[in-house]
């Protein structure tokens, strides 16, 4: 018999073989949810530190990853509930934005330099890919946290010199996004039906890489919001070294977050492809909007100094306005060969220099000490993650409302036996029971066995 959608303790008894008719109330208000107390968040932020590549995946690194996940979810809750954003304030106060940028680039380098070597080792035959997935997922956790807090100008300013490294990181991600736009979008989750766990992990990593690039686009846009306070070196790197306006135009042209499937327009939002209704197709997507705003910030000053009112009071400035317009169209003079000092990003080059020639040694060390856990270690780690990912918080930070398993409408009721399927009403639950019943019982039995 399927359990009621909602709280089983308040459910009346149903007839044998029928779903229980009781439903729970609406989901908890975002403002009522609190994952971390203020004192706990302060301790977690103070404890953030950088790890060498050799220690990625270690016990201390895993503990920090769990802490980052908690901070990430709390930051999303704070931003969504509009109750102030203490996580952002704590990161700025304790000067931890540069630490996050350093960790972001470190795990990016691990994925590019160590992970491929690890997969080629002869004795690399993992029985469980969970520890590796945590490392791969770490980059997504950090960029998601940065996307949430970089909306505030003071966060960008607190990044200090590492904003150069973050600009380079975003450029790398967006370049890959443009390069893959001609080869279709990321795989669908339904396509993850492979014979080995490693092949499934590689496809999951591919989808994750696509979503990371979209987060990097948002972070880059927030950096351009601070163009008036960025250093000359940062502006030069964005406009001259990387020619970001040209890259952004290519993104607009290829629009890798949109595609046609069976003649229907789809857009990538909330972690999966969604079909756009014909009446909504003329509306600009959020990602297109991010690109346009970034272009505007980079190419046009948001402040207009030579206004019509000013020109009326000082007519002589009309000549200056005409000169500036002509100067904007003129060919620039070739640069002089004088000595010029320019600040450059250093995190990637420093990590590469420190670990050059050690990639295989790092991979072997991590295979022996990190990615070959005992069954007891895996159970302990799974229990810790279950405590980190509270169900009510996950529902609150989900990008969209769940859908009814039978009709597809927005749902607010859930099967309380298996906690997997959602329904909009009792009628849909009853109609879906013939299909869901066996899965529901097996899932509930599996949970009890754990």
Image (tube, rainbow, N blue to C red):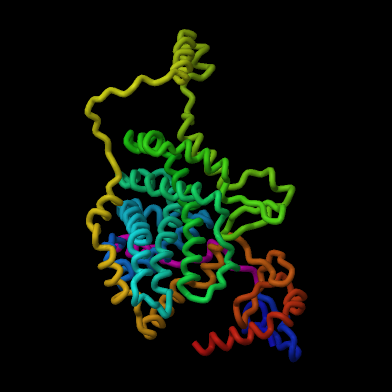
- Compared with residue 335, is residue 266 higher up or lower down, i.e. above or below? below
Location of residue 256 in the rendering, given as x and y in whole percent from the top left corner: 56, 49
Residue, far top: 316
Report the side of 231 relative to 128 (left or right).
Answer: left
Where, by quadrant of the figure, is residue 36 drawn? Answer: bottom left
Residue placed most toward the observer, 308 or 343 = 343
For the residue pair 37 and 110, the one nearer the viewer reads as 110
x and y percent of residue 232 in the render? 33, 33
Viewed as shown, does residue 164 lie left or right of 306?
Answer: left
Asked where in the image residue 115 lies, by quadrant, the reply is bottom left
**Part of the protein shown in magenta:** 25-47
> Quick check: is 300 in the magenta stretch?
no
Q: Closest to the observer: 214 or 247?
A: 247
Q: Tell me if 287 is positioned left or right of 368 in this view.
A: right
- Residue 151 visible in the snapshot: no
Residue that lies at the very extreme toward the bottom in this rendered image:
16
Q: Residue at x 36, y 19 (%)?
A: 333
């Amino acid at each position: 018999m399927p359990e009621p959608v909602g709280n089983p303790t308040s459910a009346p008894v149903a007839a044998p073989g029928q779903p229980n008719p009781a439903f729970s109330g609406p989901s908890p208000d975002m403002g009522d949810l609190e994952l971390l107390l203020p004192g706990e968040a302060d301790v977690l932020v103070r404890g953030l530190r950088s790890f060498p590549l050799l220690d990625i995946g270690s016990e201390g690194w895993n503990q920090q990853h769990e802490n980052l996940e908690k901070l990430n979810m709390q930051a999303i809750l704070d931003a969504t509930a509009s109750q102030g954003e203490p996580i952002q304030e704590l990161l700025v106060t304790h000067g931890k934005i540069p630490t996050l940028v350093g960790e972001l680039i470190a795990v990016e380098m691990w994925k590019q330099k160590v992970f491929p070597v690890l997969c080629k080792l002869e004795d690399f035959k993992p029985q469980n890919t969970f520890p590796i997935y945590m490392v791969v997922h770490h980059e997504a956790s950090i960029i998601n946290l940065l996307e949430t807090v970089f909306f505030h100008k003071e966060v960008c300013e607190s990044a200090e010199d590492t904003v150069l490294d973050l600009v380079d990181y975003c450029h790398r991600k967006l370049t890959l996004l443009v390069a893959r736009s001609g080869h279709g979008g990321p795989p669908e989750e339904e396509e993850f039906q492979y014979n080995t766990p490693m092949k499934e992990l590689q496809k999951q990593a591919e989808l994750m890489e696509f979503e990371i690039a979209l987060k990097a686009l948002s972070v880059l846009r927030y950096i351009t919001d601070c163009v008036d306070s960025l250093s000359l070196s940062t502006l030069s790197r964005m406009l001259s070294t990387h020619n970001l306006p040209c890259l952004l135009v290519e993104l607009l042209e290829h629009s890798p977050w949109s595609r046609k499937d069976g003649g229907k327009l789809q857009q990538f939002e909330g972690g999966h492809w969604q079909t756009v209704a014909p009446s909504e197709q003329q509306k600009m997507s959020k990602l297109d909007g991010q690109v346009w705003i970034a272009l505007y910030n980079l190419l046009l000053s948001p402040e207009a100094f030579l206004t019509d009112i000013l020109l009326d009071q000082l007519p002589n400035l009309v000549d200056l306005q005409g000169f500036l317009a002509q100067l904007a169209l003129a060919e620039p003079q070739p640069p002089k060969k004088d000595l010029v000092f320019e600040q450059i990003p250093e995190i990637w080059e420093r990590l590469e220099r420190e670990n050059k020639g050690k990639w295989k040694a790092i991979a072997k060390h991590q295979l022996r000490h990190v990615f070959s856990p005992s069954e007891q270690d895996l159970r302990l780690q799974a229990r810790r993650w279950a405590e980190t990912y509270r169900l009510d918080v996950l529902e609150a930070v989900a990008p969209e409302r769940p859908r009814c398993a039978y009709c597809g409408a927005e749902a607010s009721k859930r099967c309380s036996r298996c906690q997997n399927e959602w329904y909009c009403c009792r009628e849909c639950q009853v109609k879906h029971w013939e299909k869901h019943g066996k899965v529901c019982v097996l899932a509930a039995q599996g949970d009890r066995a754990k």
